Image: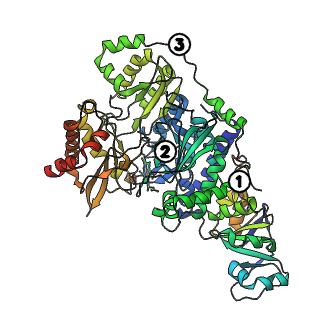
Amino acid sequence: MYLYNEFDQTLVNERVEQFRDQTTRFLNGDLTEEQFRPLRLMNGLYIQTHAPMLRVNIPYGLLSSKQLRMLAHIAHKYDKNYGHFTTRQNIQYNWPALEQVPNILADLASVQMHAIQSSGNCIRNTTSDPLAGVCKDEIEDPRPYCEIIRQWSTLHPEFSYLPRKFKIAVSGSPKDRAATQVHDIGLHVKKDGDGQIGFEVLVGGGLGRTPVIGQTIAPFIAEKDLLSYLEAILRTYNRFGRRDNKYKARIKILVRETGLETFKEQVEAEWASIRDGQLTLTDDNIQRVKNYFTPLNYETANDEALEQHLANSGAFRQWFKQNTKEHKQPGYRVAFVSLKSPNCPPGDITNVQMEQVANMADQFSFGQIRTTHDQNLALTDVKSADLYALWQQLTEQDLATANIGTITDMICCPGLDFCSLANASSIDIAQGITDRFTDSAIDTGNISLKMSGCMNGCGHHSIGEIGILGVDKKGEQWYQLTLGGSDSHQSKLGDRLGKAIAKDDVVDAIDDIVQVYKTNRTGDEDFANTLQRIGLQPFKDKVYDAH
Amino acid sequence: MTLIKNSEIVQDRWSVLEEGQALQADHNIIDLAYWNANKSELIANKTSLGLLVQGDESCDQFTDDLQHFELIAIHFPTFVDGRGYSLAKTLREKYSYTQEIRAVGDVLPDQALYLTRVGFDALEFSTKEAGLLALEKLNEFSVFYQTAIN
Ligand code: HEM
Ligand code: SF4
């Protein structure tokens, strides 16, 4: 993985001191709340219902065991012994004290981490495929390009006061596991006829109040031109993006109001003037970063021991089937660490669990951990012979719930419990769904369920196969259901099922939906296909006739 | 007002022409409307001219006339409006403008460094205190991933 040199380290250290000074000036009254706000946001610090919330970047979802131990230490020392992994592969702390934040940032800097631009109207952490570098279908490992983008975008002087936040995701495989179509810019690694690497560039996707699927602005941009092209898009957005209304300030609205063709012309005009300038990447630039991502030292291994373990234990078999995935290297598997146990809110993890996962990574997976968009973790390079021992250790930590991809592996925002913008709570609904489906989740098959406590959509409800959105009706909590959303390579927004549902009926309604699916599916047909074949009506009938 | 130029507090030689005011002897900053209305007269006059523009103004409106100006002042309506950064960068990079580019309006000392990195060589602050703090803030970082204009 990428390691900081002295230059990178100096930069994050200086950033810590800068923020320490800003915090002191704010606490002394020398900076107003209005002035401090964008400055603290650019360091990942929100002020929420109970306390500040600090979001820490995990660049493209890759952590070393040492870094994870530090995240555990921070949870213990400055927070209430837990952290929350987000849908953009980062971690959030819900209870730090403002005065302590500079110290937290200093602790992070000591393990090459930071919170720079993890919120605010600037370029956010670049996300990627959690299986980058290990999946079979990869055209090229996207992580070196993510790192190049990370460096270019970090403390970018021109793009730190954009109209609104800006998110970039990169996928290296034809199967999109990075939700690139719902990012401000989505990049797909491509190879041209001569085998040259480049990117298909998508622009104007996003979730939130007005969910939009991104469109292709350029079918192929050569790798050397990556940064100049990104800069051209960002400059066009910075100049023309709306600033009169924060709900219309994302690039998706600019692209829609300008029209993709005109927007593209503006970008290309800008690009023409900077294209072969200083931002051009040389082969050396790219190779230097690629050298940090060379294949791990895999041993020659086979699946004999695994076969034995599978034959011996049914519970292990179930976990293996649901929570592990194939690896490009024979004798190795990807193992997911489920953060969706029935005993805790989705995405939450304690400091003890973090430490244990760090130990498991050292023991079984080259000391590296990935964070996923579904708010789980993954140990991506485990010898199949070690899976049984790993499973045992995960089980001890309540991290082996065999539910990856199922309805109980849901995405859920903090909702009313923590968020000042919420219309409705999400965590207790999540708990209700978990209680209802824990025993039947595997039998039900894979269904992505995503839930947000308000239309800002932090829980990605609009791209869930089942989406749940909290709405406020005269001070009461109601929930709007959608069906058929998708964040795969064919992203799609879900369709509204009908009128909103009262809080007490939500879990029953989800149960109805699942029953309609189970009754109508043929063989192992998945939810999306069944829905497409039979349409919304049978689901509507069942849900609204019943209540 | 406190003016910082090339990392020093300096005396400001320029005055901004208010509406209806007559030209000063020298070093007048005028806005685009005034320039457009009085172009030939102003060129004939041969006083030193500066142009005041808003961050959101499209540069096409004045880039043909750049040779007449010894200074471009870019106004920030609020410190979170980042358009002025792109405008300054464009003037330097695309139009090779080499004379003074000044940041005026709502500008925080904390922004001094980024402003100079995109091509502003002069920063105007409303108090001496803010100016002094800005000077400190100019040295906050010793390393950058991006190359700078200055
Ligand atoms: C508790 C405090 C939180 C607050 C106040 C908050 C606020 C917001 C707001 C206002 C938006 C809409 C922004 C826009 O449309 O421009 C948003 C979007 C989003 N938030 Fe949060 N959020 C919170 C927590 C979270 C958490 C815990 C996660 C991850 C699990 C998250 C992930 C996201 C994502 C992925 C989006 C959508 C991005 C997009 O529109 O493309 N947020 N958030
Ligand atoms: S979706 Fe709404 S309720 Fe949920 S975290 Fe985001 S802003 Fe808060």
Q: How many marks?
A: 3
Q: Nearer the viewer, mark 3 or mark 1?
A: 1
Asked whether mark 2 lies closer than 8 Å to ligand 1, one says: no
Q: Position of residue B150 (x, y in %)?
A: 77, 56
Q: Amino acid at mark 2?
A: Thr
Quick check: A273 above or below A364?
below
Which quadrant does the N terminus of chain A fall into?
top right
Q: Position of residue A7 (x, y in %)?
A: 70, 40
Observer able to see residue A547: no
Give the letter of the chain under mark 2: A
A4 or A352, nearer to the observer? A4
> Distance of mark 3 from mark 2, alpha carbons?
35 Å
Q: In this figure, which residue is indicated by the disc labeled 1?
A: A274
> Distance of mark 3 from mark 1, alpha carbons?
48 Å
B52 or A197, nearer to the observer? A197
Give a yes or no on whether discs 3 and 1 share a subunit: yes
Give the letter of the chain under mark 1: A
Left or right: A392 as drawn, with respect to A219: left
Q: Amino acid at mark 1?
A: Ile
Crowding around mark 3 (Cα neighbors within 10 Å: few <14, some 14 to 19, many 20+) is few
Tell me if label 1 and label 2 are in contact, CB under 8 Å. no
A3 or A193, nearer to the observer? A193
Q: In this figure, which residue is indicated by the disc labeled 3?
A: A300
Asked whether mark 3 lies closer than 8 Å to ligand 1, one says: no
Q: Secondary structure at mark 2?
A: helix
